[in-house]
Amino acid sequence: MRVYRVESSGFCWGVAEAIDKALEISKRNQGPVYSYGPLVHNRQVMSELESQQIFGVDPSSEGIAGSATGTIVVRAHGVRPEVIAELEEREKQTGARFHDLTCPLVKMVHNVIAGNAKRGIDNVIVGDADHAEVLGLVGYGLPGRTHVVANPEQAAALPPLERVCVVSQTTQDYANFRATADVVRKQAQLYREVNTICRPTKERQEETELMARRVRTMVVVGGRHSANTVRLVELLHGWGCRPLHVETESELRAEDFAGLEEVGLTAGASTPLWMIERVEERLASFGARERLTLSSIARSAGAALVNTNLWVAAGAAGLAAAASTLQQIPLRWEFLAAPALFVMSMHTLNRFVDRSRLDFTDRVATLLYKRHPVPLLAVGAAAGLASVGIAALLGLLPFALALLGLACGCIYGMRVLPEAITYRFGIRRLKDFPASRDLSTAVGWAMMTAVLPFLTLKTLPGTVNLLTFLAVFFLVFLRTMALGVRDVAGDKIVGVETVFKALGPRSTARLATLMILALGGSLATLAFAFHAPGALALSALVPYVALYTLVFFRAGPPRGFLGELVTDGQNLVAGGIVAALQRGIF
Ligand code: SF4
C-alpha cells in the first residue's frame, strides 16, 4: 500500500520551541519543572518529558501552588495576563523561577486583543471556549466585551455590537473562521477582522485538504485530546474523506486498509515526526507482503549496520587509513582497529549514559538497547578497552591518548562538573556546553585517526600533520553538524550541545560553508604545496560533503538510518580512495 504523508506534519515550531526550552530549563534546574497544563497534547511525548522531570499539572493543583522550589513554565498556548502577574509575584516572594514559553504567534493575538481593548473595541474570538489558548486570549480583552464563538450559529446569537474586531484561535479552520466572521460583520456597526490562524496550521490544513481530495482514507496521528488533531479529523469528514484517528502505530489494524492501494497520512501540531514515521512504516507494511528484492535486502542491511554502529566504526577505520596516507605513515592494522573500536564504543556507551533522552529521540535504536542492554553494554565496554589495548601495542603515547579519549567520552554525558560551575553558568555536564557534541566528536575522531598514528613516529608535528588533523576535523564536524540538522528536522529532542541548536539555522549554514571551503583548502594545500599522497584524490570528498550538506539544509535530511548512511559514507569513501591508491588504481 502506498502511503502519502502531508509534508508539513510534525511539531509546529511553537510547540517544538516550547519543548526545547523546557528541556534546557530542566537540565539546568535542581528541581522539577511544572507546566500550566500538559506542555504538549500528546501522552507519549508527555510521559517522555516526565522522565526529564517536566510535569504538566493543573494550574490550580497543589503541584504548582504547593511547590516552593519547582520552576514553572507557561506552555505555548499562553495564559491570561493575571496568571503572568501572579507568577511574577510568586517569583519575587519565593524565588521559584518562572519562564513564559508562550508561542510568539499566540502572543501576537494577545497584542491584537489588548490593543482593541485599549481603544474600547469589543473582541470576538472564533474558537473553542474551553480551549487553553482561548481561555488565555479572553483575559486580554475587556471584561464582558470579549466574546467567544465556535461557529456561525453562535455568532448569530451575539448581542448587538457597535465597534468590534474578530480574531481567531490560532488553530481554527479557515472556512469556519470566514463563515463566522461574516455573520459578525452583518451584526456590527463598525467592523474589523484579523485572521490570526497561524501559518503552520494554515499550511497543514491546506496540504491535508489537497491530500484528502486525492485519497479515500487518511490516517490522522495525534492525541485524542489535542484540539487541532480532532479538528483535522472533523475537516476530513467534511471533505468526504474517511479519517482514521490513531495515537500510535499500535492502534492500526490491517483490516481497516483491506483493498486500499493508497492512503494519506497527516497529524496534529503536537505529534512529533518520529511518531508519524513509525505509523508510516507500519502502514507501508500492510497490503501485499513485501517481496524480497535487492532494495528491501539493502534497506534491512543498511538499518542493521547503522543501528549496531558497525557502519560508523567502519567509517572511522576508513578515515584513519586516509589520515595515515596523507601523513605518509606506513599503514598498520592498529591504526585502523583502535579508532574503529573507539568510535563504536563511544556510540554504544553514550546511548546508555543518556538513555532517558534517547527514549524519545531514536525509537528503533532504543528498542534494540532496551531489549539487549547487557550484551550491548558489554560490547561497548569491550570495544573501548580493546581500543585502548590496541593503542598500547603502539606505545605509551598512543596508549595515553586512547585512554584519555575513552575517559572523556565516558564522562561527556555525566554530571561531573563542580557545583561552582553548575550554579554560576547553569552547566552540569560537558554535554551542556553549547556545540559540545559536534566539537568533541570532531576532536575525538581527529585525535584517534590522525594523531594516534603520528604519535608512533616520536617526532614533532609539521604542517602536513596539522593540515591532516584539520581536514579530518572538518570532515567529522560537517558530518556531525548534518546529523544535528537531521535530528531537529525529525522533531528529535536535541539541545544546545549541537551546533544547529546553539547557533540557529542561518549561522550553522554559514559555518558549514566556511568549513567546506576550509576542508577544500587544507586538502588542496596538502596536494599542491606538500604533494601529500592521496590528497588530490581525497578532494573528491569536498563535493560529496557539499552535496549532502546542501540537501540536508535545503531539501531536508533523508529519513531514518539513511542520514547516517550518507554522512558516515564519506569516511568509507575516503577509505576506498586510499585502498584504490594502494592498489595503484589511481
Ligand atoms: S499551532 Fe501555531 S500558534 Fe499554536 S503553538 Fe503551534 S505555531 Fe504557535
Image: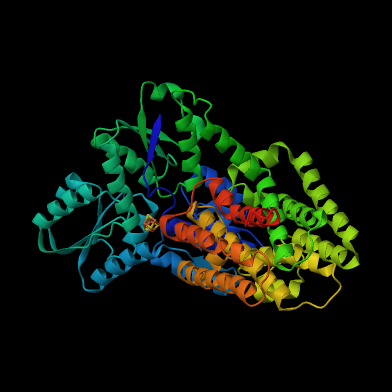
The C terminus - image quarter: bottom right
Residue 269, position as x, y percentages in the image: 40, 50
Where ligand 1 lies, by quadrant? Answer: bottom left
- Identify the residue shown where x is 49% and y is 49%: 558
- Identify the residue shown where x is 36% and y is 27%: 261
Residue 34, position as x, y percentages in the image: 56, 57
- Identify the residue shown where x is 13% and y is 53%: 182
- Identify the residue shown where x is 28% and y is 63%: 143
Which scheme is used to colour this image of the protein?
rainbow
Residue 272, position as x, y percentages in the image: 48, 48
Q: Is residue 65 visible?
A: no
Q: Nearer the viewer, residue 455 or 344?
A: 455
Q: Is residue 344 above or below residue 94?
A: above
Q: Is residue 457 above or below residue 183?
A: below
Asked if residue 142 lies left or right of residue 428, the reply is: left
Q: Is residue 518 visible?
A: yes
Asked if residue 418 lies left or right of residue 88, the reply is: right
Count of picture labels: 0
State which quadrant residue 371 falls in: top right
The N terminus - image quarter: top left
Q: Nearer the viewer, residue 330 or 258?
A: 330
Residue 102, position as x, y percentages in the image: 43, 63
Q: Nearer the viewer, residue 34 or 233?
A: 233
